[in-house]
Image (cartoon, grey):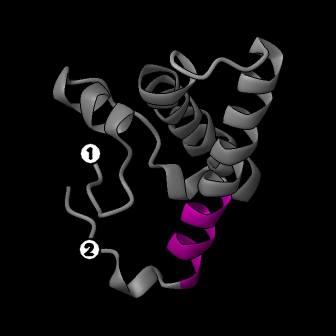
């Protein structure tokens, strides 16, 4: 399993159970952005609901769209950073 500072929590969990999975950086820009973005959207959306949206409710569809938009932006940024500086990613087998 590849480990780097860009390895997602889901990737680490999958590798902990001994399942082999393609490293996110080898999926291509679009799939990597989608994979990392959806993970971030679920985590960020859950934390936002727990700490903010449960107290100050907004429409549910707005919560989903905002979580997905932020997740894809962050996923794109992580993918871009990973592809821009590949030498600084120390991958270990």
Give the position of the N terminus as an image quadrant.
top left
Residue lying at 74% horizontally and 36% vertically, measured from the top left: 66
Q: Quadrant of residue 37?
A: top right
Say whether residue 4 is magenta: no
- Residue 54 at x, y percent in the picture: 52, 15
Above or below: residue 83 compared with residue 10 = below
Q: What SS does tag 2 mark?
A: loop
What span is colored magenta in the figure?
76-84
Residue lying at 55% horizontally and 44% vertically, measured from the top left: 36
Q: Nearer the viewer, residue 42 or 2?
A: 42
Above or below: residue 8 compared with residue 5 = above
Above or below: residue 61 compared with residue 12 = above
Q: What SS does tag 1 mark?
A: loop
Q: Mark 1, residues whose alpha carbon is within 10 Å: few (<14), some, or many (≥20)?
A: some
Q: Nearer the viewer, residue 23 or 10?
A: 10
Give the position of the C terminus as an image quadrant.
bottom left
**CB of mark 1 within 8 Å of CB of mark 2?**
no
Residue lying at 68% horizontally and 41% vertically, measured from the top left: 34
Residue lying at 51% horizontally and 19% vertically, measured from the top left: 55
Per the picture, the main secondary structure of the magenta-coloured stretch is helix
Residue that numbered label 1 is attached to: 1
34 with respect to 84 (left or right) = right
Q: CA distance from mark 1 to mark 2?
A: 12 Å
Residue that numbered label 2 is attached to: 90
Q: Earlier in the sequence, mark 1 or mark 2?
A: 1
- Residue 17 at x, y percent in the picture: 19, 20
Say whether residue 82 is magenta: yes
* Numbered badge on residue 37: none
Above or below: residue 66 compared with residue 82 = above
């Amino acid at each position: 399993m590849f480990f780097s500072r860009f390895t997602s929590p889901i990737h680490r969990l999958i590798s902990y159970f001994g399942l082999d999975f393609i490293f996110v950086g080898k999926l291509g820009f679009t799939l990597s952005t989608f994979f990392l973005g959806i993970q971030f959207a679920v985590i960020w959306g859950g934390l936002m609901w727990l700490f903010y949206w449960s107290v100050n409710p907004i429409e549910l569809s707005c919560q989903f769209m905002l979580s997905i938009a932020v997740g894809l932006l962050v996923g794109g940024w992580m993918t871009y950073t990973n592809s821009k500086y590949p030498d600084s990613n120390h991958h270990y087998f």
